[in-house]
Image: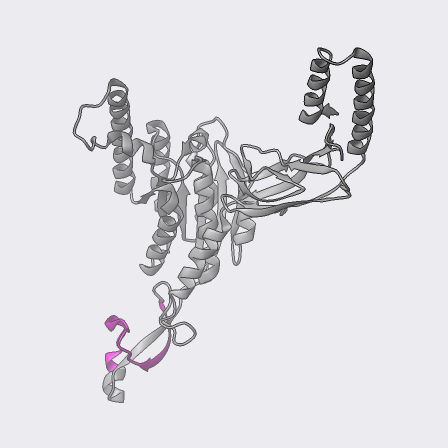
Amino acid sequence: MSPSPRAVVLAVALALALLVVPWPLVLVAAVAALAATTVDAVAARAPLRVRRTVPARLARGVPAGLSVLVEGAGARRVRVRQPRLPDLWCEPAEGDGGLDAEVVAHRRGHHLLPPVVARATGPLGLARWDHRVTGPAEVDVDPDLPAARRLASAVRQARFRDPGLRRRGAVGLGTDFDRLRDYQPDDDVRHVNWVATARRGRPTTNVYREDTERDVVALVDLGRLMAAPVRPPGAADAVTRLDVAIDAAAALAAVADAVGDRCGTVAFDDEVRARVRPRRASGAAVVRALHALEPRPVDSDPEVAFRAVGTTKRALVVVLTDLVDPAAAAALLDAVPVLVRRHAVVVASCTDADLEADVAPDADGTAPDPDAARRRVVATRVLDARDRARAEITRRGATVVEARPERFSAAVVAAYLDAKAAARL
């Protein structure tokens, strides 16, 4: 219990009244004020019925509704407050008589949303009582699944020329002959069957069965470098490289589900920490395996993950890692040649806008200050090392994909579709 501002003002007024009013009258008024405050405190202390509604699962970075409903307040004035966490941000955090807000998760994993606190002020406005009216709420935060579904939907829609009308063609180059049909203007001329054209007297093309049931494996690095923050342009909060990588893995699995391929994942640092074998419709399994993983302060060993992939069937292996550190790039360079003998390999890493900004020339042409000059030297060295690692990985047979955090998932999916279209898996 605590006195309200009105009670404090009343106490100050009674103290000043002693200067002009006989003290017996002030004493009577003080006793009456104390009695009123006591009655008000008893009323403010009466239990409240508060119900909080919040989704049990959230997607990272996607706002969701949070509501707090207060019942049984009577004549009391009630102000509710939802405490914020760095990883779970609520806006607005306070409201009179209830709360209608949005909660945004900035980190994946399992979180506890703190209890709601309600401050009840008595009918006379003299006393207040703070109630902790709910328990903590368990919230699981998934990767950015809406973005993954949008990419999968875009890929699915790209297979049609007109919505609901005529099919545009397969995603990927079919290799198994299916049937013959009349040539259409948008058909690939390489598929024209000239023997059948001569026999039938009209242009005829081969139709191939769409390439499906291909294996795609996302290798997610959980080493120390993946804990580094990156800030997408225009974003108020930074995210970790691991958050960006897991978003890309979720998008890759969603698109593989959409085109009929099998997707799996291996999460690793110096050991394998999670694994999902490639199978059909595995998007949900991939998200469940990855959504609560966090990086550890150890150096990653890509060879451990490559051994987990195996060599029994050719697959597209997408390594989601960071190329900034030369030592980590050296370990990857040593392991890549073993994998490219059997599989198509893509090494994907998100770029850092802050580093690129540090090496950009000043717009006004003035000389940078000493701190900016030192940052430029360090950033230049880091980016040069990254360029050397990228060139060496490409020389050893893998494809390198780099993109800003906000475009990273789309770039990884594009590399997958390009490999599928070129029949590399």
Out of 173 and 56, give the one closest to the viewer.
56
Q: Position of residue 290 (x, y in %)?
A: 53, 43
Question: What residue is at 47 percent from the left and 39 percent from the top?
Answer: 243
Disc tally is: 0
Q: Is residue 50 left or right of residue 346?
A: right
Question: What residue is at 62 percent from the left and 47 percent from the top?
Answer: 55
Q: Is residue 414 left or right of residue 197?
A: right
User: Can residue 134 be seen by looking at this rendering?
Assistant: no
| Quadrant in the picture for the N terminus | top right
Out of 416 and 190, give the one closest to the viewer.
416
Out of 367 and 402, give the one closest to the viewer.
367
Question: What residue is at 56 percent from the left and 50 percent from the top?
Answer: 285
Extreme residue toward the left, this view: 365
User: Can residue 82 be seen by looking at this rendering?
Assistant: yes
Q: Is residue 242 left or right of residue 24?
A: left
Q: Position of residue 299 (x, y in %)?
A: 44, 28
Q: Which residues are magenta?
A: 175-195
Q: Is residue 365 left or right of residue 274?
A: left
- Check the image and report above or below for 347 versus 209: above
Tell me which colouring the rendered structure shows.
one colour
Q: Is residue 191 magenta?
A: yes
| Quadrant in the picture for the C terminus | bottom left
Out of 260 and 140, give the one closest to the viewer.
140
- Check the image and report above or below for 224 versus 145: above
Location of residue 201 (image quadrant): bottom left
Q: Is residue 96 magenta?
A: no
Q: Position of residue 321 (x, y in %)?
A: 40, 38
Location of residue 293 (image quadrant): top right
Q: Position of residue 171 (x, y in %)?
A: 37, 64
